[in-house]
Image (spheres, rainbow, N blue to C red):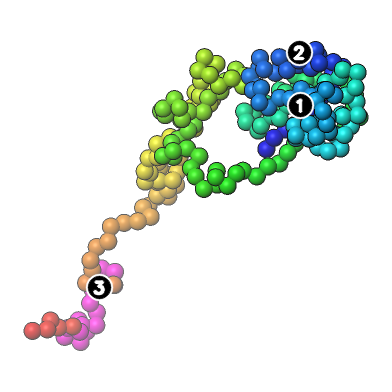
Amino acid sequence: MTTVVSRLYANKLAADEVVAVLRAQGYPQGIIDVISDADGDAVDRIRQARVGREAAEAYASRLGDGKALVVVRVPFMPIGAAKNAIETVDRFDSVNAGVANQNEYLREEPSSKYMTSKILKNHPRFLTGDLPAAHRTFLTRNLDLSADNRIGTISSKIGLPLLKRHKDKRSVILGGAFMSRKFLPFPLLKRHKDKLSVIRGGGTPFSTLLALPLLTRRS
């Protein structure tokens, strides 16, 4: 998932100033293009930067007089990177090229190699604090993921662990209470006792009435 952000500027100096700010914020050079009419087939060059055909043709028709086009292909992660890039390029005066969608969202399917392999080795709990540093998910001040720029893990900023150790419980009621003790005056289960008779009190009326046992022990 990529957002292609494109803006046309009056000259290359203005375009380079926009790029300098983006680079200072941590956007890598590999996702940024500056295109002018000196770059040969402008439409083809803009299309290679992943701008849609209709927008590419509109930009190419306006590239004369030293104008320069800035194209930034912003990936989905880190979260907020696309919004920040759009706000940054809009801080500078741009030329209206008649392009309706200057922020084009591209929906992309992940490569098959990511569908058949683990995202993280050994399935670590990547949102908890007890992981090796290489496996932790960090919040940063900007897009730079270097150690000096990290401001801690997500769980530490929230103030509680996102995962906790499971404990076996004897009751599903909060606090561990039992319904038979908390709401009802008698236990719901009681210990079984062996009985010689199903009649209350344990009597044997039939064998007593007939004066002989109904069951005898086999020799």
Residue 144: where, in percent of width, then height?
59, 20
Task: Tell me what residue is drawn at x 37 percent, y 52 percent.
Answer: 186
Instruction: Check disc 2 and give the amino acid type.
Output: Glu
- In what quadrant of the picture does the N terminus appear? top right
**Res 17 label:** 2
Query: From the viewer's perspective, is 96 left or right of 73?
Result: right
Residue 83: where, in percent of width, then height?
72, 26
Residue at the extreme left of the image, as rendered: 219
Magenta residues, start to end: 199-214
Residue 147 among magenta residues: no
Residue 211 among magenta residues: yes
Closer-to-camera residue (149/197) = 149
> What residue sits right under mark 3 in the picture?
197
> What residue sits right under mark 1 in the picture?
71
**Compared to 126, does 87 lie above or below?**
above
> Of label 2 and label 1, which has the lower sequence position?
2
Of helix, strand and loop, which one carries label 1? Answer: strand
